[in-house]
Amino acid sequence: MSIEARIHRWIRPDIIDVEPYHVPDARGMTKLDAMENPYTWPRELRDLWLQRLAETPLNRYPDAAANELRTSLASWCHLDGASEVLLGNGSDELIQILVLALGGTRRTILAPEPTFVMYRLAAKYTGTDYVGVSSSDALAPDLEALLQAIETHKPSCVFLAHPNNPTGGMMETQTVEAVVAATDGLVVVDEAYHAFCDHSYANLLPQYDNLVVMRTFSKLGLAGLRLGFLIGPREWLGVLDRIRLPYNINALTQASALFALEHMAWFEERALEICAERATLSQRLSELPGVELFPSAANFLLFRVGHGCAGAVFDGLCKKKVLIKNLHGTHPSLVDCLRVTIGTAEQNGVFFNALKEQLAAV
């Protein structure tokens, strides 16, 4: 039997059919495609961090429960005694844990779309049905359609991204509360871009026993750490923790995250700079003819170019060594849409000038 035949015999057909998550080669490019924070640590902060890492023993396993880090995060998030913290190797692992626990045969995961692709992929990996509820023409969640889908499909888990990726739009309070009230299962508010919108639904945790909030350190400027965390009722997180693999947060990540929490003011200042750059770039893009810009509370901007032009604009930018995200073809609502991450003032200027030239050429 050939290796190809053996793979097709034993690997689940639905896994073979999955398109892998593609990460393009960004070497030599102005990289504005992955919602990364463009700012690196100043020398004095980096030296202090390296000293902390040098004191971290690598011959021992890390604290399996990451108790010190979870305690610091609970304090930073102002959690009450009824809430707990669960750590993941990025938000992706937490999404996987949630779907492993709540998904499976004859179970349904639901989310308003377009949204973060990992919700759908995690459902696919676990043999869980996934229902994407189409948004309005303005790419905002359609509450009536959401409630109807919940009534029809009885989801075990609903993901609500706030702000949403890839649109950047905020989730209205009445939508969140209505979904939580209508759902027997768990509602996960994904606040990956919390640093750029200054609004959280963590304050609702004491009011609802089927609500959790998910965040990440990635957008703050620590994408290389791969650290996400879930906050919510300790009863839910206690069960979810049974699925978490032991030692999933390594010692260097724990030490680095604790260091970052001690110096969070620096990260919050960089987030404010990104918000200011977002406002500047939004204004410039809104003045370009043929560009439809969508409002964003995240560290990126979604915009639509002329009919049938997204591919040509994207390719033209790549030739100019500017990498953004081409979303055309990823969802029916995103026809001719592109997404750019907010960079430094210099990076944003490079992108804008290249885009202006390319739009004039198509």
Image: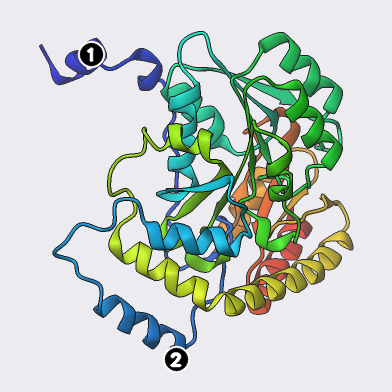
Say which of 156 and 320 sits in front: 156
Say which of 206 and 245 sits in front: 206
Percent position of residue 208, x then y: 70, 35
Q: Quadrant of residue 151?
A: top right
Residue kind at label 1, given as amino acid type: Trp
Residue 71 in the figure: left or right of residue 15:
right
Percent position of residue 310, x then y: 69, 44
Q: Residues within 10 Å of mark 2 (few under 14, many from 20)?
A: few
Residue kind at label 2, given as amino acid type: Glu
Q: Look at the picture and state if 49 lies above or below 144.
A: below
Percent position of residue 66, x then y: 36, 56
Q: Which residue is mark 2?
A: 44
Going 68% across and 43% down the picture, which residue do you hit? 205
The residue furthest left is 1
Can residue 141 be spotted in the picture?
no
Q: Which residue is mark 1?
A: 10
Q: CA distance from mark 1 to mark 2?
A: 53 Å
Q: Quadrant of residue 131?
A: top right
Going 18% across and 66% down the picture, which residue do you hit? 58
